[in-house]
Image: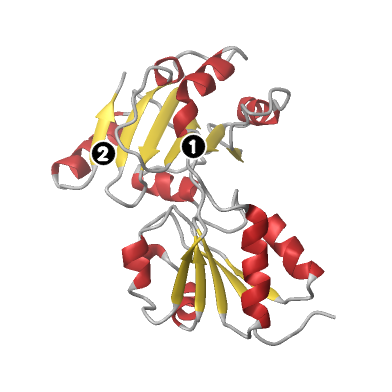
């Protein structure tokens, strides 16, 4: 039987900026003894919200040494058995590409109660930073969220999703831009399909509008997380969108915006 006392909280940290944490998430965070946090957040900004807690880094970044997923589950169980108030702080929203299922499975196996506090997913934050919508009547009636799976050669599901939706949001693809471009072009997506590249969303972000054909030769400007948004929602002839972005650039020292037309 699952215990009803002292649940473990999975809190969505949002795309990076601590100001985008929900009010409920902030309250839970401030009351925690142990905070297991991901890599894709502004640690110093979040740490200010609870300086008395023990902050334990358990994040993962592509191409870098990271903690084993099974160990994260063990940490959650062990700290709970010691009656600690635990927050598992996940980048973006816990339910989107956050390996949430693996951790919930461990808690269920140990009869530990949990609660999920949603956060702003990176794809939504990127659209907001681009001053645009992911949907538009008669242009984009469907949106998909995918991650490329090049390590699994037979896994083409992400490509099928991108092809069959109006607007595609690709997470964790920053190291695979050439492969993403080639894979989608090889499946007959137009060479001039608009692509928005957002690096470090909400934290000194870099935003670029380009096309699918030119994506393969794009050089990342930062070492932070990258999100791609692909679809005709970004018509590069849309002068209103471009004017708005240029005006924001003129008045911002932190944001960098470019166009690869």
Counting from the top left corner in percent of width and height, residue 168 is at 55, 34
Q: Would residue 103 be found to the left or right of residue 53 on screen?
A: right
Of the 4 image quadrants, the one containing the N terminus is: bottom right
User: Which residue does the numbered mark 2 point to in the structure image?
Assistant: 245
**What residue is pinned by disc 1?**
63
Q: Residue at x 51, y 76 (%)?
A: 34
Horizontally, residue 169 falls left or right of residue 198, namely right
The coloring applied to the image is: secondary structure
Residue at 61 percent across and 26 percent down: it is: 150
Of residues 51 and 217, the one nearer the viewer is 51
Note whether 188 is above or below 200 in the view shown.
above
Residue 166 position within the rendered picture, expressed as x and y whole percent measured from the top left? 58, 31
User: Residue at (80%, 79%) from the top-left corner?
Assistant: 2
Q: Which mark is residue 106?
A: none
Mark closer to the chain start, 2 or 1:
1
Q: Tell me which corner region of the image, top left, top right, bottom left or bottom right, holds residue 116.
A: bottom right
Residue 86 vs 40, above or below: the answer is below
- Secondary structure, mark 1, is loop
Which of these two is toward me, 79 or 49? 79
Left or right? Give the position of 33 relative to 52.
right
As measured in the structure, the alpha-carbon distance from the residue carrying label 2 to the one carrying label 1 is: 32 Å
């Amino acid at each position: 039987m699952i215990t009803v006392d002292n649940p473990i909280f999975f809190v969505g940290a949002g795309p990076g900026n601590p100001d985008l944490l929900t009010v409920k998430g902030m309250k839970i965070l401030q009351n925690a003894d142990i905070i297991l946090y991901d890599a894709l957040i502004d640690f110093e900004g979040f740490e200010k919200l609870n300086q008395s807690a023990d902050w334990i880094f358990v994040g993962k970044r592509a191409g870098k040494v990271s903690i084993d997923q099974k160990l994260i589950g063990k940490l959650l169980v062990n700290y709970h058995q010691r009656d600690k108030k635990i927050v598992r702080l996940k980048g973006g929203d816990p339910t989107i590409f956050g390996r949430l299922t693996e951790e919930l499975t461990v808690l269920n196996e140990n009869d530990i109660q949990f609660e999920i506090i949603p956060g702003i997913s990176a794809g939504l934050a990127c659209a907001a930073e681009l001053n645009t919508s992911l949907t538009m009547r008669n242009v984009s009636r469907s949106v998909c969220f995918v991650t490329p799976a090049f390590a699994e050669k037979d896994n083409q599901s992400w490509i099928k999703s991108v092809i069959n939706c109006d607007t595609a949001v690709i997470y964790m693809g920053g190291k695979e831009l050439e492969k993403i471009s080639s894979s989608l072009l090889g499946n007959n997506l137009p060479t001039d399909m608009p692509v928005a590249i957002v690096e470090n969303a909400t934290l000194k972000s870099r935003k670029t509008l380009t096309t699918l054909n030119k994506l393969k030769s794009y050089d990342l400007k930062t070492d932070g997380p990258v999100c791609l948004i692909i679809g005709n929602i970004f018509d590069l002839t849309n002068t209103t969108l471009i004017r708005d972005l240029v005006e924001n650039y003129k008045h911002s020292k932190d944001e960098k915006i470019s166009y690869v037309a």
